[in-house]
Image: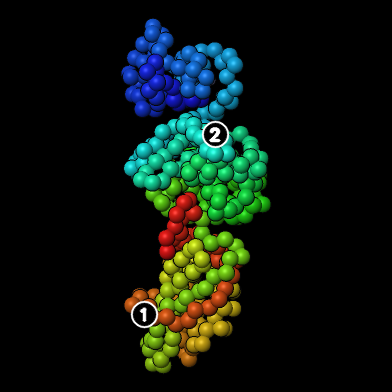
Amino acid sequence: MPVRCSDNAGASIYSFDLSRPEWDALATENKFRRHLHMPCCNAAVSLKRSRRGTPFFAHVRRGECTTAPETEEHMLLKRLIVESARRDGWNAVPEVQGTSPIGDWRADVLAIKDARKVAVEVQWSSQTATMTLERQERYRAGGVEGVWLIRQPGFPISRDLPAVVLGGKLPELTALLPADEEASARHRSEPEHWLQVLPIDEFLNALFGGRFWFGPAIGTPASVHLLGGLHYCYRCGAEGTVVSYVNLVTEHDRCWFSLRELGKVEAVWPEFNALLISAKEPIRFAYRTTKRGERYLCNECIHCGAFTGQNYIQGLIGRVAVIDAVISPAWRKAACRHAITFPVGEFTL
Ligand SMILES: [Zn+2]
Ligand SMILES: [Zn+2]
């Protein structure tokens, strides 16, 4: 269901930019003047409404045009993408065609801000991974960053292919961030296959607000920086080393965690404790439970076992140790909650 057509002068008209009276007026005008054309094949246009009442442009006669018809979901997503991008100050236009040295591309939405051009493509029908990567390469060659919203899981998880799986049903679509490449369509409702599941508008806000991050890839070498300092135990008075923050650094990513934040990903802890053996200072952590039943991680005195709350050691940010590590699925999970790197285009440390 196309949301764009053009008038006799070649200017684009977008269905969702028009109020209901404007839409009706345009329909009447077009009946008399026949001044609107489909951008795909220049065919005459009729103004229609979907079953859900969303206005869209249709071919009066499809004729030779080979552009595949779109679903209601596809049309809604285009509107949401444009609206979300515009809210964040991007210049966003649906249904844009462009060229690159290795072939033409067509984007559901092209969003431009400063030097960045981001094409967002909704892939509702299934498409092979090879085809997705080939189209991504065409965007890249044309100086455009491609971002994909794909209905069928199973695409490669890579920094070069920023993509999420589309879940949910109209009108409540969701974005699923795959935790691994094994996820398939029947896993859509099983949380363990996804790093995060977000309402679609929340995902789009993150995307255009610069908060959609790839995070460190599994297998990447990393160093774990422990920050903290010396602290006197409130119970036994002995001096000991405590850790207040953990900084996970890879070639492309740098993730900050307070001990408490990192503790929320409990899968990290067996690995983290194994790493602590190579720290020069004896350091010990333990999980405690608050009165409300929340588990949280804190430093524990190596002499008497008393714990030190995060509040008492916030200001201690000296370097305690730097330990070599490798990004495991657990570390990636932790980093993706708190990463501060941006996979789509440039990133800075
Ligand atoms: Zn057409
Ligand atoms: Zn103590």
Q: Residues within 10 Å of mark 2 (few under 14, many from 20)?
A: some
Would you place residue 238 above or below residue 272 in this image?
A: below
Tell me where residue 233 appears, x and y as whole percent: 40, 88
Question: Which-is-in-front pick, marks 2 and 1?
Answer: 2
In the depicted structure, whether residue 13 falls above or below residue 317: above
Kindly identify which residue carries mark 2. Answer: 104
Is residue 313 among the parts visible in the rendering? no
The residue sitting at 39% across, 24% down in the picture is 12
Residue placed most toward the observer, 253 or 22: 253
In the foreground, 337 or 81: 81
Percent x, y of residue 156: 62, 50
Q: How many numbered marks appear?
A: 2
Mark 1 neighbour density, 10 Å: few (under 14) some (14–19) many (20 or more):
some
Q: CA distance from mark 2 to mark 1?
A: 55 Å
Tell me where residue 77 appears, x and y as whole percent.
Answer: 48, 35
The picture quadrant where one finds residue 21 is: top left
- Residue 118, by quadrant, is top left
Q: Secondary structure at mark 2?
A: strand
Q: Which residue is mark 1?
A: 316
Write the residue at 49% across / 25% down.
2
Q: Tell me where residue 163 appears, x and y as whole percent.
A: 54, 47
Question: What amino acid is labelled 1 in the image?
Answer: Leu
Residue type, mark 2 in image: Asp
Is residue 68 visible to us here? yes
Dot 2 or dot 1, earlier in sequence: 2
Image point (53%, 49%), residue name? 162
